[in-house]
Image: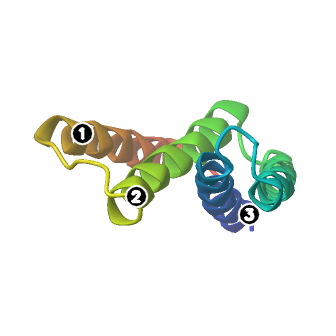
Amino acid sequence: MAWILLLFAGLFEIVWAFLMKASDGFSKPWQTVGTIVFMIISFGLLSMAMKTLPLGTAYVIWTGIGAVGAFVVGIAVLGEPITPMRIAGAVLIISGLVVLKLSSSH
């Protein structure tokens, strides 16, 4: 169950990161409120997952999901550039997440 909570925490991190970008420096009220709401949900789910998962594993996987997810959203929604170096960076992050998941006893 902790892994499912962590997955959703990471997905909500992607949402709040996107909304933060859309808030234009917190100058747009609805996007700002959405950012805060999704941050609270994401942190709450992360906190629940950390009841049983190791701190380092949970935190790195949460940030990794957010980082790679924001990278994908940036490309797919915001038209950010796709370059070999950016792709390589994302692959390295995903590789690290897989290694951490495989090394976890939970």
Residue 4, above or below 20: below
Name the quadrant containing residue 7. bottom right
Give the distance between the C-alpha atoms of the residues marked 2 and 3, in whole angstroms: 27 Å
Name the quadrant containing residue 85. top left
Foreground pick, 101 / 74: 74
Task: Report which residue position mark 1 lands on.
Answer: 86
Tag 3 secondary structure? helix
Foreground pick, 19 / 96: 19
Tag 1 secondary structure? helix
Q: Nearer the viewer, mark 2 or mark 3?
A: 2
Neighbour class for label 2 at 10 Å: few (<14), some, many (≥20)?
few
Going from N to C along the chain, the mark reached first, 2 or 3, is 3
Q: Is residue 58 left or right of residue 72?
A: right
Give the distance between the C-alpha atoms of the residues marked 2 and 1, in whole angstroms: 15 Å
Q: Is residue 67 left or right of residue 29?
A: left
Residue 89, above or below 49: above
Task: Report which residue position mark 3 lands on.
Answer: 5
Label of residue 15 in the image: none
Name the quadrant containing residue 92. top left
Q: Where is residue 101 shown, x and y percent of the image?
A: 50, 49
Label of residue 78 in the image: 2
Q: Where is residue 58 shown, x and y percent of the image?
A: 66, 43
